[in-house]
Amino acid sequence: MSSIVKFFVASPSDAAASLTHGPSASLRSVVFGNFDAEEALLNWESHLTGSTFDELLDRDVPEVFAEDEDGPTVFLLSDGLLEELAGITDSRVGEMANWWAAKTAQDGFPIDALIALQILEDLVRLIREERPPGENVYCWTA
């Protein structure tokens, strides 16, 4: 379970520099907390692309971009997940939030459906509106 989760847009060098203290204030980001970010990335991509959880793990999705063995981790969001989230409709975001809330409750780590919706809406907005060409979206967790 990650106590702090920050999704941010950055160049690879800026993403690597964010490992210790998180993304700098100059980077476009959204901040959340108290959910397993790695599992969420896997679940979202599986749900949106039809790939199984195991297929994604076999392909090393999400990619661990940088990590501190006893501290933060930076994940790179896959091109497939970014493409799906960039093109998702508002109604599909709502459906996905409800699905994710139910999934986390089933797994024993419930997330309120309204919070799930806020996380997904903010992430979609970050991907659509804040990501210039040539930059990626990362997830920093601590």
Image: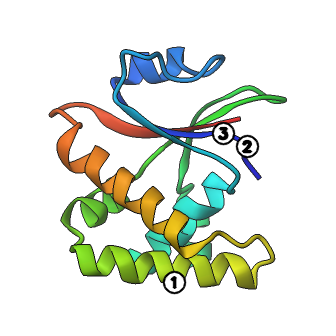
Circle 2 residue: 3
Q: Which mark is residue 4?
A: 3
Q: Label 2, label 3: how many angstroms apart (C-alpha)?
A: 4 Å
Tell me whether the residue at label 1 lies in contact with that at label 3, contact meaning CB atoms closer than 8 angstroms. no
Residue at x 18% of width, y 43% of height: 129
* Vertical placement of residue 33 versus 136, above or below: below
> Horizontal placement of 22 versus 30: left or right?
right
Residue at x 43% of width, y 17% of height: 25
Tell me whether the residue at label 2 lies in contact with that at label 3, contact meaning CB atoms closer than 8 angstroms. yes
Q: Amino acid at mark 1?
A: Trp
Circle 1 residue: 99
Q: Nearer the viewer, residue 39 or 98?
A: 98
Can I make out residue 8 in this image? Answer: no
Question: Residue 23 placed where, x, y %?
Answer: 50, 22
Question: Residue 136 placed where, x, y %?
Answer: 32, 37
Which SS class for mark 2?
loop
